[in-house]
Image (cartoon, helix red, strand yellow):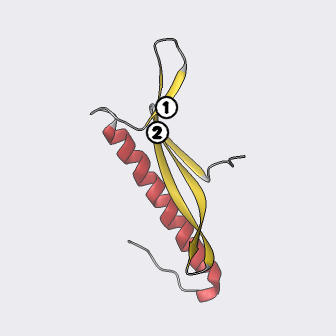
Amino acid sequence: MVGQPLARFRAGAVSCALWENEINVNGTMKTVLKAGVTRRYKDRDGNWKSSQSFSRNEIPLAIWCLEKAFEKIIEEETAQSSSNGNGVEEEVVM
């Protein structure tokens, strides 16, 4: 069963979901966040479909959603760093 996304950002028909993924880094399992961007639309028969392609007017909406997703990833990484006991507050840019 697929779990729920950590966060979702939507602008019009475009949305971005943040998912937790487990990866192996040098033999250690680590959780990373990944973003998936989709556009919802109805087909000719009225059925809802998803696409990963965007028109000229939808690209700014996708960018906005991705910017929000990026902010959330940085926020989560910063919170995780703070909880590791270093006690130093820092603003992460990259």
* Residue nearest the viewer, comparing 36 with 63: 36
Q: Position of residue 31 (x, y in %)?
A: 60, 68
Q: Residue at x 38, y 42 (%)?
A: 62
Q: Residue furthest left?
A: 56
> Which label is found at residue 38?
2
> Which label is found at residue 71?
none
Q: Position of residue 59 (x, y in %)?
A: 32, 39
Q: Position of residue 33 (x, y in %)?
A: 54, 61
Image check: 53 left or right of 71?
left
Q: Residue at x 47, y 18 (%)?
A: 43
* Residue nearest the viewer, comparing 65 with 47: 47
Q: Is residue 62 above or below residue 81?
A: above
Looking at the rendered structure, the kind of residue marked 2 is Thr
Q: Secondary structure at mark 1?
A: strand
Q: Position of residue 82 (x, y in %)?
A: 59, 79
Q: Residue at x 49, y 31 (%)?
A: 50
Label 2, residues with CA under 10 Å away: few <14, some 14-19, many ≥20: some
Q: Is residue 1 above or below residue 55?
A: below
**Mark-to-mark CA distance, 2 and 1:** 6 Å
Q: Residue at x 49, y 53 (%)?
A: 35
The residue wearing badge 1 is 50
Contact (Cβ within 8 Å) of mark 2 with mark 1: yes
Tell me the quarter of the picture where residue 27 sits.
bottom right
Label 1, residues with CA under 10 Å away: few <14, some 14-19, many ≥20: some
Q: Secondary structure at mark 2?
A: strand
Q: Is residue 58 above or below residue 31?
A: above
Question: Which quadrant does the C terminus fall into?
Answer: bottom left
